[in-house]
Amino acid sequence: MAKNTTTVSDLRQERSNPPFSINDMTEFYDGGSEATKKRKLISSLILNNPAFKWLERHYWTRDEAYSSNVQCLAEVAKILRKHKLNVDDFMHYYWLVSTIGEVVSFEMHLTTWKSALQDQGTSEQQKKWLPLVDNFKIVATYCQTELGHGTFIRGFETTATYDPKTREFILNTPTLTATKWWIGEVAKTATHALVMAQLWTQNKCYGPHLFILQVRSLEDHTPLPGITLGEMGDKFGYNSVDDGFMQLSNVRIPRDQMLMRHSKVTLDGSFIPPKNPRLTYVAITLYRCQLLMLCSNYLARASTIAVRYSAIRRQTETKPGYEPKVLDYVTQQNKLFPHIAGAYALACTGHYMIDFGKRATERIKLEDLSVLAEFHGISSGLKAFCTEMSVSGHIYNNWLASCTYEGENTVMYLQSAKYLLRCVKNPKSAPLGVSAVLHNPPGKHWDVKNMQDLEKTNTVLEAYRARAYKKVAIADKYLRELQSGGDTSYDAWNKSGIKLVDCAKAFTHYFVIKTFFNMIEKSRLGQSCHLQLHRLSILLALHGIDQNTGDFMLDNFIDFEQIKLIRVKILELFSEIRPVAVCLVDAFDIPDQTLLSVLGRYDGDVYNKLFEWAKEAPLNKTQVHSSYDKYLRNLLTSKL
Amino acid sequence: MAKNTTTVSDLRQERSNPPFSINDMTEFYDGGSEATKKRKLISSLILNNPAFKWLERHYWTRDEAYSSNVQCLAEVAKILRKHKLNVDDFMHYYWLVSTIGEVVSFEMHLTTWKSALQDQGTSEQQKKWLPLVDNFKIVATYCQTELGHGTFIRGFETTATYDPKTREFILNTPTLTATKWWIGEVAKTATHALVMAQLWTQNKCYGPHLFILQVRSLEDHTPLPGITLGEMGDKFGYNSVDDGFMQLSNVRIPRDQMLMRHSKVTLDGSFIPPKNPRLTYVAITLYRCQLLMLCSNYLARASTIAVRYSAIRRQTETKPGYEPKVLDYVTQQNKLFPHIAGAYALACTGHYMIDFGKRATERIKLEDLSVLAEFHGISSGLKAFCTEMSVSGHIYNNWLASCTYEGENTVMYLQSAKYLLRCVKNPKSAPLGVSAVLHNPPGKHWDVKNMQDLEKTNTVLEAYRARAYKKVAIADKYLRELQSGGDTSYDAWNKSGIKLVDCAKAFTHYFVIKTFFNMIEKSRLGQSCHLQLHRLSILLALHGIDQNTGDFMLDNFIDFEQIKLIRVKILELFSEIRPVAVCLVDAFDIPDQTLLSVLGRYDGDVYNKLFEWAKEAPLNKTQVHSSYDKYLRNLLTSKL
Ligand SMILES: Cc1cc2nc3c(=O)[nH]c(=O)nc-3n(C[C@H](O)[C@H](O)[C@H](O)COP(=O)(O)OP(=O)(O)OC[C@H]3O[C@@H](n4cnc5c(N)ncnc54)[C@H](O)[C@@H]3O)c2cc1C
Ligand SMILES: Cc1cc2nc3c(=O)[nH]c(=O)nc-3n(C[C@H](O)[C@H](O)[C@H](O)COP(=O)(O)OP(=O)(O)OC[C@H]3O[C@@H](n4cnc5c(N)ncnc54)[C@H](O)[C@@H]3O)c2cc1C
C-alpha cells in the first residue's frame, strides 16, 4: 500500500542520461572555468569550517544569530590570512555561497566601504585604509541613509563643518531625522564608518560628501565620545545583521578623513569642486552590478528546490494506479521553467555588467567620463528590473529588501527613464547600444510567420526592441505635451511617472534578453549545452511577451495569430525542457549544505528526511508543553 | 534646519475635512452597523485583556510565542463564558482582529472542526460534541493532509477499518507517507482530532471519511496509546501555532465516532452511500468564504500602513525648499490606491459569499442539492483569486500560505474551470449568473467613446464579461480539439492547463468586479460615501483592464484608443482619491494596537516613535555585545 516511496530513484532517473555536460553548464553559469574553480575553493573553505552552522540557524534567537555572525566574521579573517586569498574574489563568492544562510554581516566592510574608498579616496587614503580593512584591523561600514531621507541624498541633514583653526571637520546629526538609519553593522560591530554628510566650509554648504569616522574604541569597543549607536530591532530577514542608527554630536575628525579624490577642501577651507559630480556615484553603481549576481543566485536556489521537489512529488491519479510527478503538469512547468531561464539570464546580465563596470572604471580613471552616464542609466534600470524578477515568485524573505536598498526600485526606474529621454533628445550623446534602440524606428509588423521564426533570436529580440522604442517614445511625447500644455516640469514629470517607469522597464527588459542571447552566442560552449541555453533564452523571451501581450500588440506590431503561435511554442519548449529540468538546476551546483532545504535535497530522499528533520524541532523535546500546566489543564478539567 | 518634523500635523491635515462619513464607510466595510458593533465589542474584549501582548511578540522565541498562544486560548474561553457570546460570531471577529498578531491557534477548534461537524455529523453527534467544543472541554483539530498527499484526497493512505465484532473502527497510518502532516495545533495542544481516513468495511474501501479521535489524555495531556504526535519545526509565519504530525497504530474508536450524516456504516458493517458525494465538501467550501474576509483584512492593514506613512513621508525636493509627501507621487498612488480599492472589493465579495454560503447550506439541509456545484465552482476560483490578490504586493509573511492551504490555488482554478466548462456543455444545468456570462456572446466592440462612458458600471463590467466569455470559449475549444485529435482526456486536460487557469481567473475577476459594483449599488449609503466607493470600484476595474490589456484587446474588443482613455481616467481617479486616501484607510478602523506598525500609527508621530521603538530592541541592552570578547577583540587587536 505504500505510495510515494520512490523518490530517490525518481530523482536518479531524471539524471540518468543527461544530453549535455552539466559541468560545462556550471562553468557557463559561473562565468568560466576559472570562476567555477574559485567558487568551489571558497565554498569548501567556508563549508568545512565549523563556525558556519547553517542548519542550526532555524532555531536561533536574534542574539545567537548575531553572535554566530561575528564568529563567522572572525573565521573569514582567519581563512583569508591562512590561504592568502584575494579579498575581492573571496567576497564575490562568499556572497554567492552564503546568501541564504544570512551570514552577510561584513558586506559593508569588504564591499561598499572598499569600493567607495577605491573610487573616491585619494591614493594616500587608500594606502592607509585599505590594508586596515583587508586585514580586519578595523570593521568598517557605510553610513548614508537617515531617518528622514533615503532617496533624496541632497536632503540629508548630517553636517560636516570644516574648522580651519584645528584643520578638522566637526560632524553633527542636528535633528532627530538626521539620525543615520538602517546602517548595516553599525549597532554592535563596526569600528569605523564612511559617513555621508553635508559639507560646510567657509559658511557655505557644498552638498553631501563622504567622511571616514572611527565610531568605536579599538581598545574596548565602546562608542567614542559624542557618538550614540544602537540597533533597529527585528526585521523580516537579515536578523544576523546589526542594522542600526547613529547620532553624532560635535565629533571632530582630521581633515584628511574626508574622501578627496574628486572634491577637495584645502587647508584654509577653500572648496575645490569635482570635474564631474556624477563621479561620486560610481561606487554604488558598481555595487549594483554585484547585486545582479545575487538576483540570479536567489532565483537559482529557489528553482533548484522547486524543480527537484516537483520531480519527486507525485499527486493526483491520472490513470488508474498512476500519479504523475507534479513536474509533469503543464501548470507547474509554467510556474517553474521561466524561473530556471531567468536565473541563467540574470547570471549572464551580471557577468556582462560586472565586466562593463570594470571597463567603465578603467576609462574613468583615464579621465574619460563619457561612459559614466551610460553605466549609471543602464545599471539603475537593471537594479530595479532584476531584483523584481528575482523576488517575483515570493521567493526569499531576506531578499525582498533588495528592492529597496541600493536605490529604491521606482526611483531607479525613473533615473533610467531620465537617461533614456536624454538620449532621445541628444542622439549624439547616446552610446551605440542605446541609439540602436531609440533612433531606429521598428517596422510595422513583426516578422514571424511560423514556429521556426520563433527560434530566431534576432527576430524575437526585435519584438523587445520595438516595444522599448515605442514605450520610450510614448513617455517622451506625453512629457513634452504636458510641458508645452503649461505644466511645470515637476508636474509634468510626476504625471508621466507611470509611463516613465514603463519605458525604463521595457528598455531594461530588452537589455536583459539581448544580453542573454549575446552571452550564449559568444560562449564557446559545445552544441549540446548551446541547444539547452538557446531553448531557455527563447522560452524566457516568449514568456515575457506572453506576460505583456498588450505592450507588444501596440500598433498591431504583434497580432493575435502570432500570440497564438507563441503559446504553442511555449508548450513545445516546456516539453523539451521537461526531461532536462533537473539537470538544468543541478548545474547551478548549490550544495545541500547551503541550499538549506529538505525538499530540495540532491538525493531526493525527501519524505524520510523531512520526517527526521521535524522530529528534531525543539518543541518536540517534551511530550507535554509547560503551557499545559499553566493554562490548559484548568480550562479542560474545570466544571462549567 | 530640522526637516520632516511636521508628520503629526501632516496627517491631521489629511483628515481635516472628510467629504464623507468615515463611520458610515466603516459600517459598509464591516457589512452593516450591527457587524461594526459586534466587531468593536469583541475587539475591545480582546485588546483590554493583558494576555494579548501584541507588541512584545516581535522578540519572542518560538517557545514563548506558542506559550502565549495557549494562554490566549484559555483567556478566550473565559471571555466567551463571562460575556455569554455567540461562539461563531466571536470567532469571525476574533480572526479579523488578530490576524497580524498571529494569535490563531484555535482556528481549527472553533471553525473547521465545528463546521465539519455541523455539516457531516448526525444530530446525536452534534449534540454530544459541539458543546464540548464550545465550552472548551476539549481542544479539537482537523486532520486531513498527509506527508504524501495534499491535493489528492483519494490518495490518502490513513485507514479506518470497521471491526463488526467490537463495533469499532481501527485507525492506522500504515506508511511513512500516510503520516498526517501540517496539522494545526495537533503537536502540543489538541485533545481531539477529526481524522480523514480511507473507510474499509467488509473488505472494501469506500474512500475518505471523517472520524472523531481523541488524541490526548484529558487527565494529563499525554498522547494516548498508539498515537505519535509531534511538531514540524519553524515556519515562515504562524510560529505561535504548533502545526504537527500524527501517526496511528491500531487505534480503536467506537463506531459512533465516524461522522455519519451522509455516508453510514451499519452495526454489521454494511456501507450506505451518501445521496451526493459532493456533500462532503460543504464545510471546506464555507471556510473558504471566511478566508475572503481575511484576504480583505490583510490588504486593509497593509494599505493603512502604506497610505498613512506615505502621507507623512516627504522625499525629494521638487520646488526649492519643498518636498512633497510621497503620496503625491503618481507612481506611489499607482502602487497603493488599487489596493485600497481591492480591500473594499474583497470585503464585498466576502460578505456576499458568506451570505451565499448560508443560503446554500439552508437549501442543502432541505435536500435541494442544485446549488452545491455552483457554490463549489465559484468559491474555488474565488479562494485562489482573492488570496493571490491579497498577497500581490509581498504583503504579509504569515498570510502567504493562504495560497496553499484550504485548497492549493492552481488546483482551485482548475476545479473552477472544470465547473465552468461543465456549464458550457450543459447550459440547462448552469445557474442564471453563470449562464449570463457563458451563453451570451458579447458584442464586437466595447461601447466606450469617451471618459463619461468609463464611469458606467454596466459598460465597464461588460468588458470583464466579454473577456470571461472568450477565455472560457478558448479553453473549451482547445480542450475539445485536443480530445478529438486523439489525446487521452488526461493529456488534453493537462495540455490545456494554462488556458484553463486563465479562464477561471477571467471568470472570477469578472465575479469580483460585479459583486463589488452590486454591493455598492445595493447599499443604502448616503451619496457622499457612494461617490467614493463608486470611484474605487471604477478604479479597481479599469486598473484590472490596464494590467491585462492583451486579454481585453482579444478580437479587438477594446482598442488602443480606449486603452488610452482608460489610462487618462485612471490618473483622474488618482487625483480624486488622493485627498481622501487617508480617510479611506481610516475607515478600515484598525486600531494601532493590532496594526502593530510604527509607520502606520494613527497619529502620524512616526519618527519620534520609531526611534523610541528601536531603542527598546533587546540588542540595545548592552553597549558592547558579548560576542566582542569572544570573537572580535582578538581579531582587531592581534598583530599580523
Ligand atoms: C535591509 C536594508 C539594509 C540597508 N542598509 C543600509 C546601509 O548599510 N547603509 C545605508 O546608508 N543605508 C542602508 N539602507 C537604506 C536604503 O538605502 C534606503 O532604504 C533606500 O535608499 C530607500 O530610501 P528610503 O527607505 O528612505 O525610502 P524613500 O526614499 O523615503 O521612499 C519611500 C517611497 O517614496 C517613493 N519615492 C521617493 N522619492 C520619490 C520620487 N522622487 N519620485 C517618486 N517616488 C519617490 C519611493 O518609490 C518609495 O515608494 C538599508 C535598507 C534596507 C531595507
Ligand atoms: C500553514 C499551513 C497550515 C495547514 N494546516 C492544515 C491543517 O490544519 N490540517 C490539514 O489537514 N492540512 C493543513 N495544511 C495542508 C494543506 O491543506 C495542503 O498544503 C494543501 O492541501 C496542498 O497540498 P500539498 O501541500 O500536499 O501540495 P500538492 O498537492 O502536493 O501540490 C504541489 C504542487 O503540485 C501542483 N499540483 C498538484 N496536483 C495537481 C493537479 N492535479 N494538476 C495540476 N497541478 C497539481 C500544485 O499546483 C502545487 O504546485 C496546511 C498547510 C499550510 C501551508
Image (tube, coloured by chain):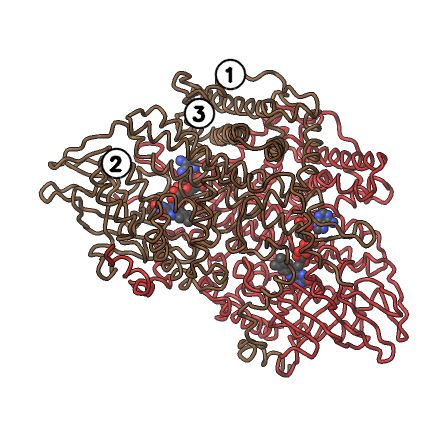
Chain colours: A brown, B red
Q: Is residue A146 left or right of residue A311?
A: left
Which residue occupies 54% across, 57% down? Answer: B236
Q: As drawn, which residue projects farthest toward the left?
A: A165
In the rendered structure, are the residues bearing label 2 and label 3 in contact, judged by CB atoms less than 8 Å apart? no
Q: Position of residue B525 (x, y in %)?
A: 61, 46
- The residue closer to the viewer here, A552 or B422, is A552
Amino acid type indicated by mark 1:
Asn
From the viewer's perspective, is residue B231 above or below residue B436?
Answer: below
Q: Position of residue B167 (x, y in %)?
A: 84, 78
Q: Is residue A315 left or right of residue A140?
A: right
Per the image, the residue denoted by label 1 is A440
In the rendered structure, are the residues bearing label 1 and label 3 in contact, judged by CB atoms less than 8 Å apart? no
Per the image, the residue denoted by label 2 is A207
Q: Is residue B102 left or right of residue B148?
A: left
Label 1 Cα neighbours within 10 Å, binned few <14 / some 14-19 / many ≥20? few
Amino acid type indicated by mark 2:
Gly
Are tags 2 and 3 found on a single chain?
yes
Secondary structure under tag 2 reads strand
Which residue occupies 62% across, 29% down? Answer: A550
Q: Looking at the image, tell me whether mark 2 or mark 3 is earlier in sequence order.
A: 2
Per the image, the residue denoted by label 3 is A420
Q: Quadrant of residue A261?
A: top left
Closer to the camera: disc 1 or disc 3?
A: 1
Q: Position of residue B623 (x, y in %)?
A: 29, 63
Q: Is residue B1 visible?
A: yes
Secondary structure under tag 1 reads loop
Q: Chain of mark 3?
A: A
Q: Position of residue B288 (x, y in %)?
A: 69, 55
Q: CA–CA distance between discs 2 and 3?
A: 26 Å
Q: CA–CA distance between discs 1 and 3?
A: 14 Å
Amino acid type indicated by mark 3:
Leu
